[in-house]
């Protein structure tokens, strides 16, 4: 009987496992009057904010979702393994007051993510224990002691995201739609390096960009005065778009014709003053920009002007999914949206598109980028943004790939100001060097390698056309959206370009700074 008693006494002298400790943090009178040798370590749960980064590849987003591999799922398990969460609270985040400052979509990364909760952070070495139970694509920077009422979601004033956009995405002749690629075959301007990726990125007509308008007062597929046709190209009712190269035809005959349900649009090379001189298109590299296009001051000024259209409070129901126009959550406030700097990673030049807002909805930023790129590539007029932000209009807009997006930082300005005299500041100031290293090593390199390997942006650009997104061809006249394609004349203006439409004769003339295209629908 003495041996078991001795073993039990020895066990009481060992350091307790934090995972099995109770919530209680009080000390009994017996403990107070006992000898120092008989005292046990008593750890407290403390409210903290954890600042960390991760590369989102391989994860189905931030938010925990049963049956899916998520960032939160791995974080909770690592916290348990590190002793920060006791056994009886494992898998039940409400019990340790869990909160996240931002959710990220599938494949989206983060550098300044913040979560909060009540955890056992003693004995010392909590961060090392926590990090050791996470994959290398995570980096736990540190934690800050916060007030008992702190909540990473509710106390976050604003969030800053960055979308790394390859410069070639803004080049109107880089990664053309697949019809243009096929039309170029056999000519002097073959886009041979885009043939494979355009085929891989082929979209089935009727799936992309198809939307039934449900605005009040809709009649025969047309919306009332503030609406548009559910298919802007319905006048020609074409489902099969063919592109033909007319580089060698006479100027007066460089027109398209309509044969049955097939719409034949021309592919005309740009001509100079000499009518006999044809300026051949440069061949486009499927991975890098070799067209001579650069993100110069003119391009920067135009792109920033387009992005600035998003600033302020607007209804973003067209830039997300499963959110109705009359839902209050569709209204979001964008503080700033700019693209002033570029970085070069693995031979690809990227534009850093920085957006700061109070909060964002599912896919919102990627769709905002998608529309802006479509406008820069002359696939849509700048007025499309204003139209898409209207409450009574439903349109389908393109969505940029997820790989280039990451959460850059979460801000807690009001909280820091209120508690600056008694609590630590919740910010990334102490971890700026580590955060930059993590960006370069994990996020930037992943974005560049993905573009080299998979060509995500290049594939997406091949689908960015009227066939997949008919709503891009939104026409306005006198600031109002066109509703009657048979009786109105429409003028579409883009950067230095114009288009005139006489819908009564169904004759459309489109002129861009890249090439001249004329379409006649009979």
Image (tube, rainbow, N blue to C red):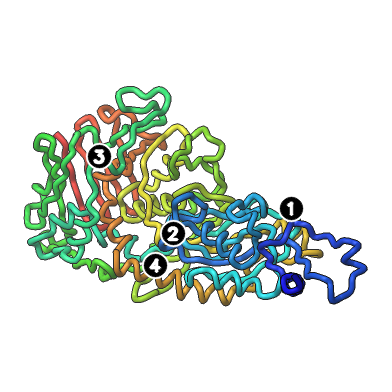
How far apart are labels 3 and 1 at the CA level? 50 Å
Measuring 65% from the left and 64% from the top, which residue is drawn there?
A: 84
Evaluate whether residue 158 shows in this view. no
Looking at the rendered structure, the secondary structure element under dot 4 is helix
- As drawn, the label of residue 447 is 4
Give whichever of 160, 156 is nearer the camera: 156
- Tag nearer the camera, 3 or 2: 2
> Going from the N terminus, do you reach mark 3 or mark 1 first?
1
Q: Which numbered disc, 2 or 4, marks the residue that appears first in the sequence?
A: 2
Task: Say which quadrant the C terminus sits in.
Answer: top left
Instruction: Give whichever of 72, 265 is nearer the camera.
Output: 72
Circle 3 packing at 10 Å, graded few (<14), some (14-19), many (20+), is: few
- Residue drawn at x 17%, y 61% is 195
Disc number for residue 59: 2
Image check: 415 left or right of 460?
A: right
Q: Secondary structure at mark 1?
A: loop
Determine whether the residue tagged by mark 2 lies in a helix, strand or loop: loop
Q: Is residue 198 visible?
A: yes
CB-based contact (under 8 Å), mark 1 and mark 2: no
Q: Which mark is residue 149?
A: 1
The mark lying in front, picked from 2 and 4, is 2
Q: Who comes first in sequence, dot 3 or dot 2?
A: 2
For label 3, the residue is 206
Residue positioned 53% across, 35% down in the render: 327
Vertical order, 93 against 54 (above or below): above
Which marked residue is nearer to the observer: mark 3 or mark 1?
1
């Amino acid at each position: 009987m003495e041996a078991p008693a001795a073993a039990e006494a020895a066990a009481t002298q060992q350091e307790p496992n934090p995972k099995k400790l109770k919530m209680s943090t009080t000390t009994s009178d017996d403990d107070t009057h006992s000898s120092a040798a008989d005292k046990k370590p008593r750890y407290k749960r403390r409210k903290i904010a954890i600042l960390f980064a991760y590369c989102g590849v391989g994860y189905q987003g931030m938010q925990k979702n049963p049956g899916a591999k998520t960032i939160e799922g791995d974080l909770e398990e690592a916290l348990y393994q590190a002793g920060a969460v006791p056994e009886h609270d494992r898998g039940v985040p409400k019990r340790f007051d869990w909160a996240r400052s931002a959710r990220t979509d599938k494949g989206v990364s983060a550098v300044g993510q913040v979560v909060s909760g009540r955890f056992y952070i003693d004995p010392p070495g909590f961060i090392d224990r926590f990090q050791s139970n996470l994959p290398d694509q995570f980096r736990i920077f540190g934690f800050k002691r916060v007030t008992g009422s702190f909540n990473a979601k509710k106390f976050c004033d604003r969030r800053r995201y960055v979308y790394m956009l390859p410069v070639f995405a803004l080049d109107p002749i880089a990664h053309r739609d697949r019809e243009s690629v096929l039309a170029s075959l056999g000519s002097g301007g073959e886009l041979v390096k885009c043939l494979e990726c355009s085929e891989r990125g082929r979209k089935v007509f009727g799936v992309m960009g198809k939307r039934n308008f449900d605005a009040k007062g809709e009649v025969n597929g047309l919306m009332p005065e503030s609406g548009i046709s559910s298919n802007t190209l319905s006048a020609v009712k074409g489902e099969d778009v063919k592109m033909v190269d007319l580089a060698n035809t006479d100027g007066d005959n460089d027109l398209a014709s309509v044969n049955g349900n097939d719409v034949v649009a021309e592919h005309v090379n740009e001509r100079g003053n000499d009518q006999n001189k044809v300026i051949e298109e440069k061949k486009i590299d499927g991975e890098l920009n070799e067209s001579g296009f650069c993100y110069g001051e003119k391009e920067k000024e135009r792109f920033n002007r387009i992005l600035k259209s998003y600033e302020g409070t607007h209804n973003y129901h067209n830039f997300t999914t499963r959110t109705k126009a009359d839902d209050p959550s569709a209204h979001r406030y964008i503080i700033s949206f700019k693209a002033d700097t570029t970085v070069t990673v693995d031979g690809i030049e990227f534009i850093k598109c920085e957006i700061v807002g109070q909060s964002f909805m599912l896919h919102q930023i990627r769709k905002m980028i998608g529309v802006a790129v479509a406008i820069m590539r002359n696939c849509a007029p700048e007025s499309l943004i204003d139209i898409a932000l209207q409450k009574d209009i439903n349109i389908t807009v393109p969505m940029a790939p997820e790989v280039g997006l990451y959460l850059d930082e979460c801000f807690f300005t009001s909280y820091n100001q209120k508690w600056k005299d008694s609590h630590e500041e919740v910010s990334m100031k102490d971890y700026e060097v580590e955060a930059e290293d993590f960006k370069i090593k994990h996020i930037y390199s992943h974005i560049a390698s993905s573009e080299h390997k998979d060509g995500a942006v290049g594939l997406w650009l091949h689908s960015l056309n009227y066939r997949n997104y008919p709503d891009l061809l939104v026409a306005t006249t006198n600031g109002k959206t066109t509703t009657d394609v048979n009786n109105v004349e429409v003028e579409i203006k883009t950067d230095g370009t114009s288009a005139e439409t006489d819908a009564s004769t169904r004759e459309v003339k489109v002129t861009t700074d890249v090439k001249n295209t004329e379409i006649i629908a009979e």
